[in-house]
Amino acid sequence: MFRFFSLTHRLAIFFTTVAAAVVLGLGMLFLVATERHFLELDRITLQDKQHLIENIVVNANSTDDIPSRLRESLNNHHGLSVIVKNANGDVLFRTEGFQPPATLDAPKPEHRISEIQSWKNQGREFRALNLRFNPANSAAPPLDVLIAIDMEDHMQFMAQLQRTLVLYAICAIFVSGMLGWFAAYKGMAPLRAMKTQATTVSSHRLDERMPIEAVPVEMADLAQELNKMLDRLQNDFQRLSEFSSDLAHEIRTPISNLLTQTQVALATRRDADTYRDILASNAEEFQRLARMVSDML
């Protein structure tokens, strides 16, 4: 397919492809770095809320006091959802409307905190920590606490960032392609100059040569070899011209003799012996011409 494209277009396509790969790679790297940054922010936020809730649960007078204290403390925490369950699985406190999936991993027996977990529900995405710690009464069984934050703000930011990066990537690739074509076109200027110079070479102008000093180093060898080829062509053409000139002089004499003798023979009536002598002389001239032709071959 590429053989139908000019060298300028090929270089522009290759340059655009490389630029597109670099721009898209940087865009993906930026998105991944941003996502990791948000994950770290969410981890810090969840750990901060963990300390807050743990302080409330541990310092509560009783398990019955936990819901009211949590409701009072978490009232102004936008996007934060909490579920507190006792050892029997009974819900002691639940943020209104919050319903996590039942497949979330509980903390391992040797750990109080699970890894950060994520899930989607009705187009919204959440990140959560599952905790387990003892209430104020250390004799009471431990409580399971699920702390989750709504990632809607993050998702909106990431969606807007993706749209911006896509628009930027399209513009950057287009501009890179145009600049690549312009750079390739300007870079091919010496080659076009050599082409123009080559069109001036003809059988009457074999002294034309490619400009070696005006071309880049990469093309200087090509120009030099072309000039050597033109030198050989000029020398061969010069020898051919000299040979043609010498041949014309050699052939002109026998032809002139044949023409003169024939005209003289036709001028007046001759006897048979005279015609025979004239034909014999013409035969000698023809033999001379035949030898010349043989030498040429």
Image (cartoon, rainbow, N blue to C red):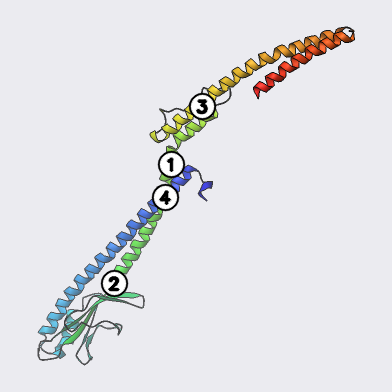
Q: Nearer the viewer, mark 3 or mark 1?
A: 3
Q: Nearer the viewer, residue 205 or 118?
A: 205
The residue shown at (58%, 24%) is 203
Label 2 belongs to which residue? 151
Counting residues from the start of the chain, the first of labels 1 and 4 encountered is 4
Q: Where does label 4 land, which residue?
A: 16
- Judge the density around disc 4: few (<14), some (14-19), many (≥20) Cα neighbours within 10 Å: many
Q: Which residue is tagged 3? A: 230
Q: Give percent across and percent down for residue 64.
A: 15, 90
Where does residue 249 sit, x and y in percent of width and height? Answer: 66, 13
Q: Nearer the viewer, mark 4 or mark 2?
A: 4
Q: CA distance from mark 1 to mark 4?
A: 11 Å
Q: Split into 4 quadrants, where in the image is the C terminus?
A: top right
Identify whether 217 is placed above or below 48.
Answer: above
Disc 2 marks which amino acid? Met
**Horizontal side of residue 166 vs 258, given as left or right:** left
Q: CA distance from mark 4 to mark 3?
A: 38 Å
Disc 3 to disc 1: CB gap under 8 Å: no
Depth order, front residue of 254/148: 254
Which residue occupies 18% across, 79% down?
113
Mark pair 2, 3: CA separation: 75 Å
Question: Does residue 272 appear left or right of residue 126 in this picture?
Answer: right
Circle 1 crowding by C-alpha within 10 Å: few under 14, some 14–19, many from 20 = some
Type of the residue with mark 3: Leu
Q: Residue at x 75, y 14 (%)?
A: 284
Residue at the disc numbered 1: 184
Q: Pointers 2 and 3 in contact (CB under 8 A)?
A: no
Residue 172 visible somewhere in the drawing? no
